[in-house]
Image: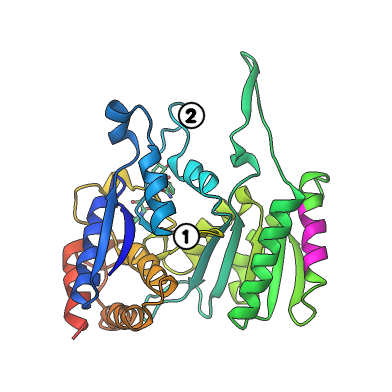
Amino acid sequence: MKTVTLIKGDGIGPEISDAVMRIIEASGLEINWDIQTAGSEVIAEEGTPLPARVLESIKVNQVALKAPISTPIGTGFRSVNVQMRQALDLYANVRPCKNLPNVKTRYENVDLVVIRENTEDLYAGIEHKIDENTAESIKIISRKASERICRYAFEYAVEHKRKEVCCATKANICKLSDGLFLDCFRTVAAEYPKIKAREILVDNLCLQLVQDPSEFDVLVMPNLYGDIVSDLTAGLIGGLGVAQGSNIGKYGAVFEPVHGSAPDLKGKNKANPTAMLLSAIAMLRYIEEYEHADKIEKALFKVFEDGCFTEDLGGKMKTTEFRDAVIMNLG
Ligand code: NAI
């Protein structure tokens, strides 16, 4: 039996985690969940929001499913999510974004993937106060990390039979840092003559995405732009409740929804578990449980085809009712 680290997170995390565990179990697949806690709830006892045991568990199992963990805004501890990605060198954040059956949005034919560099940029966490009224954050862009993520994007394009990789930067303004990222993109693109390489400024990308997202295929970009753009692309297909993600490294992977802990929905049985379920389906494919992944995906899509939605998608279903509808469709 495969062992997978499970971090249930906080806010809506435990509700959507439980829904996903129940669905996987109902599909007939037995997984040994190595449940690990992290975030504010463990600080008092363990002195840190990300104890070494959590990282150790992921290193040993080489795969994790993770629900969102809250980060205090402005003050408090550094994001557990960012720390985890850096500590495990999960350098590629992959966020596929594709229309779901019967989920009505402003756009049709969306089928793109945002590939975000996951370890540096402004997320390196190097910032300080110069004086009471001035703060400085340092943006790190290295050739090693930039070439690595661009190569990942082209390899992804080859593997998934995609035609184009588009690199988004602000190299007109951040000439050295984003300029280096773009230079790395051009170097790597030259190794993949069969994949079209395109360049765009990230502000223009946002404009083009909301005008005609079908124009885009694989997108690659530094960390901060990827964070923002992938929330935008989630909006193209129905919102954060349906946007999946994965963090891939050389020695393991952590699968998690794009969305946060949605404290406004905590304990209300209103969260859409789809993003977490799609992340879990991607995790099952990663561990080569293709049959169960396909079975669960089919059952999920059937729920949408039947017009059953949670409130974020204009429906009336509770999290648990949606979960049960997926389970019913597993046959
Ligand atoms: P959020 O993604 O939690 O919520 C934004 C909006 O989307 C809210 O209106 C929320 O109700 C809605 N939403 C999110 N997920 C949903 C779902 N599954 N079903 C239905 N509606 C959903 O973003 P916010 O409010 O900016 O962040 C809340 C907390 O989450 C913060 O502490 C933030 O740091 C953390 N966060 C954690 C992430 C992670 O663990 N990877 C990622 C993003 C944010």
Q: Quadrant of the C terminus?
A: bottom left
State the image quarter where residue 284 is shown: bottom left
Q: Tell me the CA gap for discs 2 and 1.
A: 29 Å
Q: Residue furthest top?
A: 132
Residue 185 among those drawn in magenta:
yes
Mark 2, mark 1: which one is toward the viewer? Answer: 1
Closer to the chain start, of discs 2 and 1, is: 2
Question: Which span is picked out in magenta?
Answer: 181-188
Evaluate if marks 2 and 1 touch, with contact meaning CB atoms under 8 Å apart: no
Residue depicted at 69% across the width and 59% down the height: 148
Q: Position of residue 33 (x, y in %)?
A: 26, 59
* 328 and 81: which is toward the camera: 81
Describe the element under mark 2 as helix, strand or loop: loop
Residue 210 among those drawn in magenta:
no
Residue type of the residue flagged with mark 1: Ala
Examine the rendered structure and indicate whether residue 24 appears above or below residue 126: below
Residue depicted at 58% across the width and 64% down the height: 114
Q: Residue furthest bottom?
A: 331
Examine the rendered structure and indicate whether residue 79 appears above or below residue 316: above
Q: Tell me if mark 1 has few (under 14), some (14-19) or many (20+) residues whose alpha carbon lies within 10 angstroms of its own.
A: many
Which residue is labeled 2 in the image? 74
Q: Position of residue 226 (x, y in %)?
A: 59, 55
Q: Main secondary structure of the magenta part?
A: helix
Describe the element under mark 1 as helix, strand or loop: strand
Q: Tell me if mark 2 has few (under 14), some (14-19) or many (20+) residues whose alpha carbon lies within 10 angstroms of its own.
A: few
Q: Position of residue 205 (x, y in %)?
A: 67, 61
Residue depicted at 48% across the width and 33% down the height: 78
Q: Which disc, if any, is residue 253? A: 1
**Residue 217 seen by the camera:** no
Tally the marks. Answer: 2
Residue type of the residue flagged with mark 2: Gly
Relative to 24, is 102 on the left or the right? Answer: right
